Image (spheres, rainbow, N blue to C red):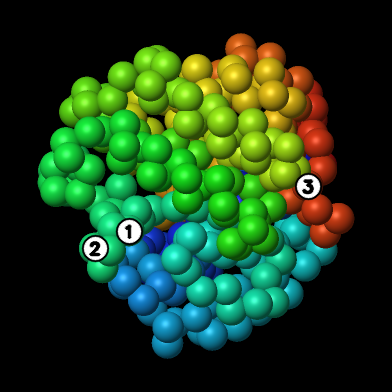
Amino acid sequence: MLFGDFHTHSTLDDGKSTLEEMAAAAYDLGLTHFGFSGHSFEEYGQDFCLPKKNVPIYLETARKLQETYRGRMEVFVGMELDYFGENPGGLDYVIGSVHCVKQGDAACYVDESAQASQRAVDEYFGGDWYRYTDAYYDLVADLPQKTGCQWIGHFDLVTKFNEQAHTIDEDSTRYLRRALEVMEYLVKQGVAFEINTGAVARGYRTTPYPGNALLRQLKEFGGEIIVNSDCHYAPQLCFGFDQAVQLAQAAGFTHTNLWTRDGLRPVSWDEFGKGRE
């Protein structure tokens, strides 16, 4: 069996568990492949990113753990590189993500809170939520060029609070038009998309990113997927993977992918599961 989780955070950025605790949890769960992906440093500096002083500590500690588990579990040192983040180089992989939509000198974080998003829409987008989502997807479209990412993190993060706030009609043509244009473009660029269960683990959503309509369309476009938990707390590693697999299968996907030393590797659903042989 092959099993992996590659979107994880630690106490060096905005997580609740140390790198050591995350790796130990991965091993105890029977993961064959595991990745660290700390939030890249960025000047706009919400509390979620790696402080600049922590970047070398993160890289050094993660590399040591890679050696510690060598021969027992494949460990990779990656980064969740934000559109406005800094790439320190020397990474095994990059997750490309957008957390912030800039308007002039203002940084509007789409995942801060429902109230912060509403203020941003009112102040900078004339109260039009779809101008806001279009601006978000415009940045997502540029992630491969900007970050060199291997896959897109939480593609529709801009909808994080929508199950409670109901500010966006996620089935409307007005919302989907730009989202689907960008999705199709990214598929043609050869980047994969993660099914991200993090917002489910933290109680913001009942289904993973991307939403079901987008996930089905991703399959129609011929996109590739990788299942990740966006884990910030070791006991929640691989949270919701059963649901993610069920939704992927319902959308028509016959396999997921794991990150390996040779890049993304397709893994059938029959192969994907807990336990090292």
Residues at marks 3 and 2 touching, judged by CB atoms closer than 8 Å: no
Three-letter amino acid code at the position of disc 3: Leu
- Indicate the quadrant where residue 13 lies: bottom left
Instruction: Report helix, strand or loop for mark 1.
Output: strand
Q: Position of residue 51 (x, y in %)?
A: 38, 79
Q: Looking at the picture, which amino acid does disc 2 mark? A: Ala
The image shows residue 231, relative to residue 159, as above or below, that is below
Q: Residues within 10 Å of mark 3 (few under 14, many from 20)?
A: some
Quarter of the N terminus within the rendering: top right
Indicate which disc residue 264 carries: 3
The span from disc 2 to disc 1 (Cα, nearest Å) is: 6 Å
Q: Quadrant of the C terminus?
A: top right
Query: Which dot marks residue 28?
Result: none
- Quadrant in which residue 87 is drawn: bottom right
SS class, disc 2 = strand
**94 sits to left or right of 49:** right
Q: Position of residue 167 (x, y in %)?
A: 22, 27
Residue at mark 1 to residue at mark 3: CA–CA distance: 32 Å
- Which label belongs to residue 102? 1
Judge depth for marks 3 and 2 and give the one in front: 2
The reply to whether callout 2 and callout 1 are in contact (CB within 8 Å) is yes
Residue plotted at (67% across, 70% down): 91
Label 3's element? strand
Query: At 26% across and 33% down in the image, what residue appears?
Result: 129
Mark number for residue 106?
Answer: 2
Q: Residue 70 in the image: x percent, y percent?
A: 77, 67
